[in-house]
Image (spheres, grey):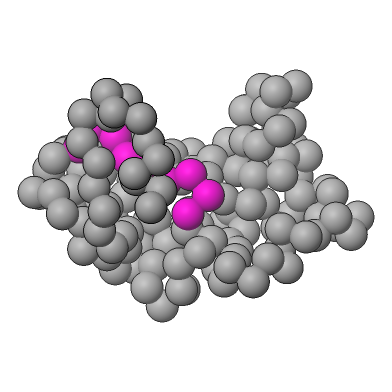
Amino acid sequence: DRLDMIPNGIYERLILSSADDIDADDNTYDDIVAGEVIEHIDPADVPGVLKELKRVLKPGGRLLLTTPNPRAILVRLGRDKVLKDPSHINILRPVELKQRLQNAGFEKIQIKGSGKMSNYLPENFPILSVFGSYLAISRKPL
């Protein structure tokens, strides 16, 4: 239903498939953006999903993932509604996501701030806990 709501002409191609079985050939995409997705994937399925994302990326292609930051200051102050969302079954700390990406064979992994605070602070602001979400950027090896 959501794909049907996207106006024609915005995207070259729309794909409806499982994240661990993407309907695309190997080495198809320059970049993949998975915004606020990984927290909805069962932890046991994450290795297969990352393997599949790597498969469809071109050599040197980038994977950009955003996800809620469980170490955010507001979460520590009790504004943890995002962590209590029942659809969020895989909340990863930045170090955990970085390790998962490394285990999947991604390289040049960078963790940056994202979310609403990135409207006020640069993504490279040195204190990641001020951001409600974070961005992990990684590359498929050449």
Q: Indicate left or right for 77 with 133 as reference.
A: right
Q: Is 105 situated above or below 128?
A: below
Give the main secondary structure, helix, strand or loop, of the magenta stretch.
strand
How far across and down, in percent of the image, does residue 88 sit? Answer: 59, 66
Q: Indicate left or right for 102 with 140 as reference.
A: right
Residue shown at the point (28%, 63%) measured from the top left = 18
Front residue (pair 80, 87): 87
Q: Does the stretch in magenta take in 6?
A: no
Q: Is 96 situated above or below 64?
A: below
The quadrant where residue 58 appears: top left
Residue shown at the point (68%, 66%) measured from the top left = 85
Q: Over which residues does the magenta segment extend?
A: 29-37
| Residue at the outermost right position | 77
Front residue (pair 72, 98): 72
Q: Quadrant of the C terminus?
A: top left
How far across and down, in percent of the image, does residue 30 sit? Answer: 23, 32
The quadrant where residue 23 appears: bottom left
Front residue (pair 78, 6): 6
